[in-house]
Each structure stands twice: as C-alpha cells, then as structure tokens.
Image: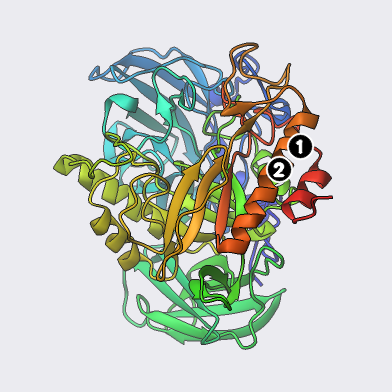
Amino acid sequence: MGKNVNNSIQCRSFKISLGIVCMMVCLSNYTIAKSNWQAAKGPLMTRWAGEVTPEKVHSEYPRPQMVREEWFNLNGLWDYAIRPKGENFPERYDGQILVPFPVESALSGVMKPVGEDKSVWYRRTFELAQNWSSQRILLHFGAVDWETSVWINGQEIGRHRGGYDAFSFDITSALKSNGMQEIILCVWDPVDSGTQPRGKQVKKPEGIWYTSVTGIWQTVWIEPVNKVYVKSLKIIPDIDREEVRISVLCQGGENDLHLKAEVFAEQSSIGFIKGEINKQLSIPIKNPNLWSPASPFLYDIRISIQDSEGKIKDEVQSYFGMRKIALGKDEAGVQKLFLNNEELFQFGPLDQGWWPDGLYTAATDEALRYDIEVTKQLGFNMARKHVKIEPARWYYWCDKLGLLVWQDMPSGDAYIGHDDPDIQRSPDSAEQFKLELRRLIEYYGNHPCIVMWVPYNEGWGQYDTPGIVKLIKDLDATRLVNNVSGWADRGLGDVHDIHSYPGPDMPALENDRAAVLGEFGGLGLPVRGHTWQEEKNWGYRSFDDAVALTAAYKNLINELYKLIDKGLAAAVYTQTSDVEIEVNGLMTYDRAVIKMDPEEVARINGGVME
C-alpha cells in the first residue's frame, strides 16, 4: 500500500515515516541559532501564531496530489536583506526571516515594507545525505511573489515570474559532491506599480485593498528523484462512463518503460491498468462513490514508472473524487447548476484568504483547515476564492471536508467601469496573465472541489474576454466558466453573474446560462479587541451588535430564498472573515469570534426562518 505525505495531513490511507527522511538532510549551523528569532509585534495575531517556531513551520507535505516518500522541508530561518533593486549580492544580511511568511508579515519576524524600488535577498545552507548522491535533486517553491532569481553555490539555476504558482528547478548540476550547499534568492515585486496579477495587494492599503506581500509565501522544499520521474498528473473523472482518465507526463525516458496506475477505495484495491508512459490511461470505476459536499468521498491512486522487469523507477501517490459539474435545466426549464447530474444551489462566502499575522500565509495548516470547517459549520456548501490562489493544502482540505470552490484568477493591470469596453493590455502584460492563468488551471485542475473558473472580477484587468473564456475552455472542458463576476458581462461562459450590496438581486434568466449572484451582503460588525485598528473600520453596512447583525442577515437570506424560487442558481455572501480595516466578515480577522451564533446561521442558511 502507499504511504502518506505527513503525520498531520492524514491523507486517507497513505503514510510516510518522516523521521527517517528528516535524518537525510542536515541544517546548517546558522539556521539552528533560533533563540534570537521572534515574531514581530503586529496589530493583530491569531491563536495559531503561538504554535509557530523555526523548528515547526508548515511542516506538512505541500503537494498532496502528487506525493513522494522522500523529501525535505526548507521552511525555517533564512538570512535576508532588503536592498535597492539592481544591487548585486549583499555583502552582509540584515537578519533572519522565518520562511514561508512574506516579508511584510508579523510572523516573518521582519514586518517591513519593500516596494518596487527594492529587492529582497534570501540565503540559507543545507547538507545532503550521501544516499541522495546518485539521484537528481529538485528544488521546489510553492509560491514566491513575484520575480525570482535562484543561485545554488554561486551558480544561477533559473528565474521565474509569477506570484501564485509553484515552480521547480533541477539543481543537481550545481551541487557540490559533499559539504554545505548554499541557496540564494533575489525577489522583486512591483506590487500595484506593475501590470502583473496581484489581487488586492497595494502599497497604500485602504478599504478593500490590503497590505502588499513580497517574497516567499509558500513552502520551500527539495526531493530526490531518479533520471526518469513523474513530472505532472492530469486526472479526469467521468461519472457517466464510470471511469477515471489519467495522463502522466514523465521527465526523461528510457526504452521498455511502462506505467502502472492502481486505484484504492478505503484501502482496498479496486482496479489497475498498465500502459505506455506519456499516454492517457482509463480505469473503470464501477458504481462510483460520488464526491459531493454532503459526502466528500475520495479515491486513492498509486502511479509508478516501471521497467520491463517490474522495477520501480518512480512512484507517486495521489487521489481524486468522482464528480461532475455541469449546467442543466430544472423541471421548469430554467438553467441551473448541476452537481453529479442533480440540481444543487451553490451558496457560500467570498473567501479572501488573508491573515493578520501572516497576510497571504496562514500561521499553520490547522488555521487553513479551520476556515473551511467554519464555512461548513455555518451551512454553506461553497466558497468563492477571491482574486487569490491558495497553497495546494487549502484545496486538499476543501476536497477532504467537502466544499465547492469558485476559483478566481488574481487581478492585475488597469481596471474598467461597468459599461466600459475591455482594456488593451500590452503584449507582455497579456502574455503574463495568460501564462499564470494557464498554470493555475493546470496545477490545480485535479482538485474535485474546484467547479468554476472566474478569470475576472468587476472589470479588474478585464481584457479579451472572448479569448480568455476560450482559453479556459480549451484547457479544461470539465468545469464551468464565469466570464466575469459582476459588472462588465460579455454574454459568454456558463453563468451571468451580478453583484448587489447589500442585495440580494439576480440577473434576468437566460436560455443558455445560469443566473448567479456573485457578491452580496457585506453586513459589517467591528468586534472590539479583534480588529486591525481600533477606530475607523469599514463595512458596506455596519451594525452595533450581534443581535442586530443576525436580524439583518436573516432578512437578507429570506429575500435570497425568494430569488431561488425565481430561478437563481447560486449566491456568494461577503465574506468569510474581516480583512484589515474591512469588517464585513462572518468571523473576525483573527478568527477568534464567529460574529453570529453558528447554529442560528446554519438554520437560516438552510431556509429555517422561524
């Protein structure tokens, strides 16, 4: 049977003994000098911040849909320096930073602005065990915002542009035969001075715009692989044909190699197939146990590259859910959203994914999970991930716990008004947007939780809408596409999405698209002692206490149910939590207070209005 990614992931049946793996790589002496590090004093901290130490910081396996047994986590203390953009390697460093928290965050220990005129330098060392010496060594970054250059032992090994996507380098040729190995990074981020996808990051935060994020903000790690290894997976469930289709892209190649894929349901093998590498394989899944928010059943799959004698060259573990998302007409002939060939009203919060102590980065994996648990507890079945892309483990918990996701593409470049035409991007801006959009869809496309792609929000960076919708459909024909959430609808995609504050409201019904309410609500309540600042907090509509807030929420959802009766197919309430001075959250920014009684909210969301 396969092996798990980490003790705390508890990823169904696979388990890894990380104690042995951690013995394979030794940290350098400077990273062990941890006693001098402490988090910076931020305006507000979460309860999970106290669990973060240089010895224990996001220690879970970061890529739960393509797991190898041997790996090593490079999170922890790194040297850092902030220097003018274009300056060469720093002669000295300013201090230590706790990776993977961004420079501007309290949990990084730095909490300093950077800006477009400066770069951030990172440095650390590590030592490889001898039993990795005959293998290729891959260096992985979950995400670094935004332009990254990487050196190993003084040799530049690559550059990357993109603030949200994972990237890797084969660093084997730059490694020394023994002793300490050195990693140096230089990261530059133009924030809102550039045209790159950046979401809600700005240099001068106010209202719905938040503190900028620079540098490493997801896990950094290394793993050994053989000359031939699995580079990527594509998993397509098909509940109508009762099969799952698997495409495996392999790096390297040798004669007489083949691929074996075996599927497990609750630790029992239910089928396998052998075939050529780099070819699509189909495995029957008879009478599939369907994935849904009510029953998020996941199948495990083990994939191996083998030679003619059956010797394994590489092996990875993954999982998938048998589910289908599509449009369909109800009994009245109204276009609705169908999950697994049954109508399902999708209802959930706008989820910003910001944290007071870590900004883009949650303090712990438990914190990531908590947001999803609360969303489910409040009676929602969906979340719209708003102009941000999360670490893969956030989507893993949505897969595991059963939460549908509408995934936004982070916005960038110029913005347009309600009635304006699409902007004209420069060739560089357009190419970068398409590149990062493509990476989003390809990297996260195996997660059953994601059911809709949203390239644009309210005209933010909206350009060539027909071309972008076509690009998404060409990349992924299995999910729905929302051409723009709010404002400048172009009549394309699978849904017509409007915003209404506080609302609710709905667009006119159409024959070929479902009517959805992409944002509404925004009922605000500042909770003293749990806000980013004591005064001058902001909400779309503010209340003085939980009783008044609950009454207003009840009236709002009562009106929403009237729209459901008229054909509304989905709705997104603003929002999961407060963010900085914005107090529209169901929870406070520190997640310490759920502002309304959870049982009462769950009853209201379920249509019980007594």
Percent across and percent down for residue 524 are 64, 28
Location of residue 184 (image quadrant): top left
The residue positioned 56% from the left and 29% from the top of the image is: 540
The residue positioned 42% from the left and 57% from the top of the image is: 496
Secondary element at tag 1: helix
Residue assigned mark 2:
555
Tell me if 400 is positioned left or right of 150 in this view. right
Q: Quadrant of the N terminus?
A: bottom right
Along the viewing direction, whichever of 52 and 568 lies nearer the viewer: 568
Percent across and percent down for residue 558 are 70, 49
In the image, is residue 245 above or below residue 37? below
Q: Which amino acid does label 1 sit on?
A: Ala
The residue positioned 37% from the left and 82% from the top of the image is: 276
Q: Which mark is residue 172?
A: none
Along the viewing direction, whichever of 187 and 124 lies nearer the viewer: 187
Secondary element at tag 2: helix
Q: How crowded is mark 2: few (under 14 residues within 10 Å), some or many (20 or more)?
A: few
Rounded to the nearest whole Å, what is the CA distance between mark 1 and mark 2? Answer: 6 Å
Along the viewing direction, whichever of 33 and 364 lies nearer the viewer: 364
Contact flag, marks 1 and 2 (Cβ < 8 Å): yes
Tell me if 181 is positioned left or right of 300 in this view. left
Q: What residue type is labelled 2?
A: Asn
In the image, is residue 83 above or below residue 246? above
Q: Can residue 233 be seen in this view?
A: yes
Residue assigned mark 1:
551
| Residue farthest to the left, as pictured | 427
Percent across and percent down for residue 475 are 33, 65
The residue positioned 56% from the left and 75% from the top of the image is: 330
